[in-house]
Image (tube, rainbow, N blue to C red):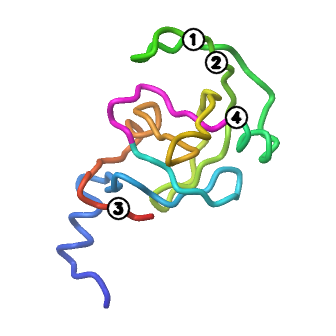
């Protein structure tokens, strides 16, 4: 079933792309499901997943403040295919193996033309 003109207009409201709470994305060409988190200022990728992608080098280290306290994390840059667009973005590397998604997309990516509809789940 094809989308109506109204649906297409809604999806690209004011030139912005609508994302759901969970999205299928690609990082450096490898598919993964990411959690879209408007509460996170930065995007994050699981340490072992980043290692398997051979991303790097580490460009800098960043201080992250969370409910668990402060930590210093390495930061890398990667190609991300999300919402039909490819962008380059920074990710901090963390241990996310105990979490549902190996990748978290934060506001550093979302502010580049994305809106979030948390009722959508595009796993």
Q: Is residue 95 left or right of residue 8?
A: right
Per the image, the residue denoted by label 1 is 71
Residue 28 horizontal/vertical position (percent): 71, 51
Q: Which residues are magenta?
A: 37-47
What crowding class fits label 1: few (fewer than 14 Cα within 10 Å), some (14-19), or many (20 or more)?
A: few
Per the image, the residue denoted by label 3 is 121
Considering the numbered disc 1 on the image, is that residue within a helix, a strand or a loop?
strand
Mark 1 and mark 2 in contact? Answer it, CB < 8 Å. yes
What crowding class fits label 2: few (fewer than 14 Cα within 10 Å), some (14-19), or many (20 or more)?
A: some
Q: CA distance from mark 1 to mark 2?
A: 6 Å
Compare marks 4 and 2 and give the one earlier in the sequence. Answer: 4
Residue 17 horizontal/vertical position (percent): 35, 55
Residue 120 horizontal/vertical position (percent): 29, 61
The residue drawn where x is 66% and y is 24% is: 75
Compare marks 3 and 4 and give the one earlier in the sequence. Answer: 4
Per the image, the residue denoted by label 4 is 47
What crowding class fits label 4: few (fewer than 14 Cα within 10 Å), some (14-19), or many (20 or more)?
A: some
Q: Specify the quadrant that holds the N terminus.
A: bottom left
Compare marks 4 and 1 and give the one earlier in the sequence. Answer: 4
Q: Is residue 57 above or below residue 33?
A: above
In terms of image quadrants, where is residue 59? top right
Q: CA distance from mark 4 to mark 2?
A: 10 Å
Mark 4 and mark 1 in contact? Answer it, CB < 8 Å. no
Per the image, the residue denoted by label 2 is 73
Considering the numbered disc 4 on the image, is that residue within a helix, a strand or a loop?
helix
């Amino acid at each position: 079933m094809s989308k109506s003109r109204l649906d297409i207009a809604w999806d690209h409201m004011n030139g912005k792309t609508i994302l759901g709470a969970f999205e299928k994305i690609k990082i450096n060409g490898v598919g993964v499901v990411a959690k879209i988190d408007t509460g996170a200022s930065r995007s994050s990728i699981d340490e072992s997943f980043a290692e398997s992608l051979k991303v790097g080098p580490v460009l800098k280290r960043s201080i992250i403040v969370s409910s668990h306290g402060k930590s210093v994390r390495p930061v890398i840059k990667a190609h991300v295919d999300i919402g039909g667009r490819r962008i380059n973005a920074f990710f901090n590397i963390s241990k996310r193996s105990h979490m549902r998604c190996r990748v978290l997309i934060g506001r550093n990516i979302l502010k580049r033309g994305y809106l979030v509809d948390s009722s959508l789940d595009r796993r």
